[in-house]
Image (cartoon, rainbow, N blue to C red):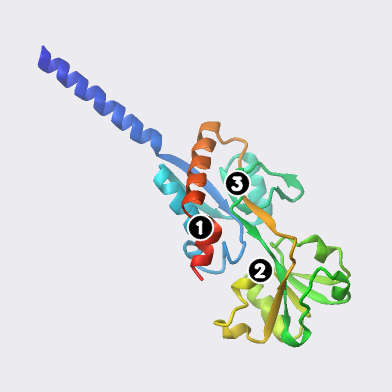
Amino acid sequence: MSVINTMIKIFCLLILVLSSLVAKTQPLNIGLIDYPPHIDFDDDIEQSPLYQYINNMLAPAGFTVTFMKLPRERALLELTKGNIDLLLPTTTTIDNKTMKVLPSPLFHSVPGLCFKKENFIPILSATHRLANLTIGAPVNSPLVPALTDSSAKIVLIKGRNAINRGLEMTQRARFDAFYHPSPHKVYHRNNPLYKELACSYFHGYATPIHIAVSNALPISTFNLINTAFDKALLDKSYEYYFASRE
């Protein structure tokens, strides 16, 4: 009788262990928006630094993650419908709609303009200097008010390789300048392709970039994700992770 009781206890213990393992493995659908250089649809998405950071963050927490590349408009629709659980990277608003986000931002984006060196404008807060300039910008990059409120002519670049094409058109003087979400990624001494360029920043326009969350996501799952995210930030922030890849 004691043998049977022991076997029953072992069986129950196995059930509890298996149930615990199943409970810790949760599917998670994540939408990605093209946001070079952090998420770059023109390259292998698995090589994008933000993809790697998020994947490394969630896998140890027991999530089975599926990533989907989405245009901004569809991404918002899928998040609203609950077809994706998370959306990144994004600000707290997209298409003038407020997003539910994880409390801590992923990073702060400091955009700027890249010029041919002979046309370089170092201080972008003097927006009158932008008057009558033709400035190219990737269609998916949110523009800072200093640029949109200026008298510059803004040309949105659609399609693949928008950043490379914009910089090339600046080199060829088709644009007076090119708006870049992270100029430091292209403007450095080890990149001879852009040696004719000089870039400056819109200081004071650092924008917190977040992970948006579907309202349909259970609060328990939200808490698990947020705990994993806070732990990842504490171990190594995304900004430090990104800088260490340079």
- Residue 49 can be seen in this image: no
Q: Earlier in the sequence, mark 3 or mark 2?
A: 3
Mark 3 surroundings: few (<14), some (14-19) or many (≥20) residues within 10 A: some
Marks 3 and 1, how far apart at CA: 17 Å
Residue at 64% across / 54% down in the picture?
Answer: 209
Marks 2 and 1, how far apart at CA: 21 Å
Tell me how many marks there are.
Answer: 3
| For residue 143, side relative to residue 150 (left or right) | left
Q: Amino acid at mark 2?
A: Gly
For residue 94, the mark is: none
Q: Quadrant of residue 154?
A: bottom right
Q: Residue 77, how many percent across, how many down?
A: 66, 46
Mark 2 surroundings: few (<14), some (14-19) or many (≥20) residues within 10 A: few
Marks 3 and 2, how far apart at CA: 31 Å
Query: Are the residues flagged by discs 2 and 1 in contact, CB closer than 8 Å?
Result: no
Nearer to us in this view, 18 or 131: 131
